[in-house]
Amino acid sequence: MTTPWRDRALPAAERVEDLLSRMTLEEKTAQLYGVWVKNDANGEDIAPDEAGMTEAFDFDELITRGLGQLTRVFGTAPLDPEEGARVLARFQRRIMAASRFGIPAVAHEECLAGFTSWRATAYPVPLAWGATFDPSLVEEMARSIGRDMAAVGVHQGLSPVLDVVRDPRWGRVEETVGEDPYLVGTIGSAYVRGLESVGIVATLKHFAGYAASVGARNHAPVRAGVREFADVVLPPFEMALREGGARSVMAAYTETDGIPVSADRALLTELLRGDWGFTGTVVSDYFGIGFLETNHRVANSRAEAAHAALAAGIDVELPSLRCYGEPLIEAVKAGEIPESLVDVAARRVLLQKCELGLLDEDWSPEPATASVDLDPPRNRDLARRLAEESVVLLDNPDAVLPLAPDLRIAVVGPRADDPLAMLGCYSFPSHVLPAHPDTALGIEIPTVLESLRTELPDAKITYAAGSAVDGDDTEGFPEAVARVSEADICVAVLGDRAGLFGRGTSGEGCDAEDLRLPGVQAKLLDALVATGTPVVLVLLTGRPYALGRWHGGLAASVQAFFPGEEGGPSVAGVLSGRISPSGRLPVSVPKSPGGQPWTYLQPPMGLFGGASNIDPTPLYPFGHGLSYTTFEWTDFEGGGDGDRVPEIGTDGEYDIAVTVRNTGDRAGAEVVQLYLHDPVATVTRPDIRLIAYQRVELAPGEARRVRFRFHADVSCFADRTGRRVVEPGELELRMAASSTDVRHGVRVALTGPVREVGPDRRLHCETEVREAH
């Protein structure tokens, strides 16, 4: 007779209750932690606090109790995909054979910009996803990433990052989708849908407030107000849970108003599970529970940290057993921690394992196939399409782009001929390979220089680095200036080097003091412009940098946010004209390094005014991006009759539409953006905020009719009492090509009572695209 917990005919909840009733305290707690069994011969730590937070353990003795999670078998050291799959299978067989119940571990990996594994496709970073304004393509990418992970035995991906940029100096801006919660929520939800559609557990991070740290310093306190939290920080997470179906959430490192997230029951249980109805697992960020004792100092011992985290609602300690191991067991036995807290967390973990099939008697850890290719042509095609759509043409005042095919071109800059210039800090080559300098990248990553030579075979192309990414060495300036002086045009390729904890200019723990270009790159650009040769600036960065210093002095400006392994050909394709640029800025580009932090989501007094001499108005606004073709917006539908303002109820809907036509001689994509302006409310509101968008691909002469159906729910906000409400009053809907380039607008009056809305409210404006003539 089949043991009930093994019986697939029974509901998962019944199976798990039967299993829990059979488990000892030690076996239950074993499900609540992961271990990091490093296959890295040099044993170097990744994070600065890692050595002091990692517990030594005897793996063979430990797994006699079972094991909750295995940490980053692929993402720790270079392993061929086939070997990695065999290593993971061996670990699973050992775990199953050693423990009484034979339950395998959940294997988790990073997948921020692709599966963080050697020889796996390195896709563009999330900031580049935001620049595409193309959720369907991001979903397709995530589905591909998930398939690759599943093929080698991985169950859970620690992505996507749903933090909304609040200060572009923060090092992890590259990991975000942008500075607008609606863009972050829609792109992030698409990624979650893709990952979950192939059975990979998507983990939303970092819940919540992490990107709003003081001074843009990693791990610094968060001092966001309750309304900023409710209206900016939380909506992307809510959207990704409701519409993406994410099954896991990662608690952030930070504290808000004195309460560390890892000990915040109001956030992790009352809001997340109570108000939003989340039923999945909450995992700690790496060492986050231990930080309650060592960094936040709200716990006096490891056991107290475990108690606080369990009571708050964290089910799994990653990546170690520092707190949820022996300290938790001893505290429960001593009566200091109720065993019921362990049971609640173990129940959630086992329910998820049941969903994954890990409680089934016939589950096998063996790879489905002996041959695994993690960077096949279909992946590279996806990476290329994303990269091409993400490149933003900032400026082209004299139409020097596209480049003529037979020019003398001086390619200059420290990012021009470095494959790593394309990659963010969570790509395997940037994240892990610095500790393995003799190991090949594992994937082909053409540089901008190589790609331009391929793209423009008749051009005479010379090259000089000019400088390093950072540091103060200017010895390369004379050669760079000489090459540019001999050329018809200069392509200056500048930007960031991704790294970790100060080992780069962008990435986790690589926060910036200001928004000047790193190192002496600004001086290099000055020297190139001073030659009189037209300069096309190409930026490969993880954040926006202040460009006002050169405004009017450059022939053209192109922005790419770490565009991945196919980024070089994509940037070169834009420069040559093979690709018509269609990216739009997911973050504002500032004029000057000062006046920060600033994003476009500003109430009236956050905008430039006479009360301060500092003008934070960006050089290029959120949503901005140029094309090589032209678009005409006609036949606007949405206005009232004469001066009459249309009225709808505070639970009503209103349609607004426009026809977009490609009036140029080449194909291109326009991004129609809908913004909301709320002139008067009971609390201050952003002057404008994005509430819908639609990317429209058009052949020359082709037209599409884009219709948005605005629902009053979309105008809701947190009022003075913290309730989420729709208020009566006049609103303005603005149809725009960027947050400042408004093409059409209409005033709408909401009538009726103030209406409180909950988690079942409408999150979107319905969108329809059809052919137009």
Image (spheres, grey):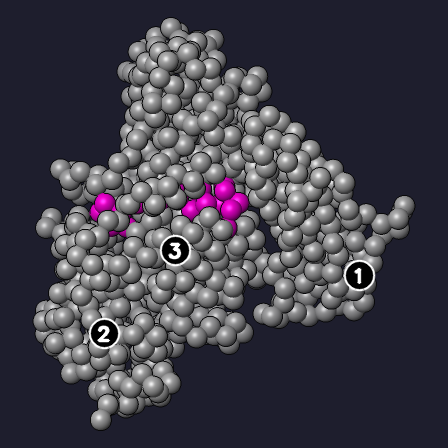
Span of residues in magenta: 116-135
Q: Residue 682: horizontal and vertical position, in percent?
A: 73, 59
Q: Nearer the viewer, residue 496 or 448?
A: 448
Q: Which residue is mark 2?
A: 363
Residue 126: in magenta span:
yes
| Total numbered circles | 3
Q: Nearer the viewer, residue 442 or 587?
A: 442
Q: In the figure, residue 756 lies in which quadrant?
A: bottom right
- SS assignment at label 3: helix
Q: Position of residue 704 (x, y in %)?
A: 66, 42
Identify the residue at image location x=46%, y=48%.
137
**Residue tagged by mark 1?**
648
Q: CA distance from mark 1 to mark 3?
A: 40 Å
- Tell me the SS state at disc 2: loop
Q: Where does the C terminus fall, quadrant-wise?
A: top right
Residue drawn 73% across the image and 66% down it = 651
Q: Amino acid at mark 2?
A: Trp
* Residue holding disc 3: 143
Name which residue type carries label 3: Arg
Task: Measuring from the top left, give residue 622's x and y in whole percent.
Answer: 57, 40
Identify which residue is drawn at 69% across, 56% down. 709
Determine which of the numbered discs, if any, sits on residue 537 in the image.
none
> In which quadrant of the rendered view does residue 521 lie?
top left
Q: Does residue 507 appear in this view?
A: no
For the residue carrying disc 2, how many other residues have a C-alpha within 10 Å: few (<14), some (14-19), or many (20+)? Answer: few
Label 3 neighbourhood size at 10 Å, few (<14), some (14-19), many (20+)?
many
**Measured Cα–Cα span from mark 1 to mark 2:** 56 Å
The answer to which of marks 2 and 3 sits earlier in the sequence is: 3
Q: Position of residue 80 (x, y in %)?
A: 17, 49
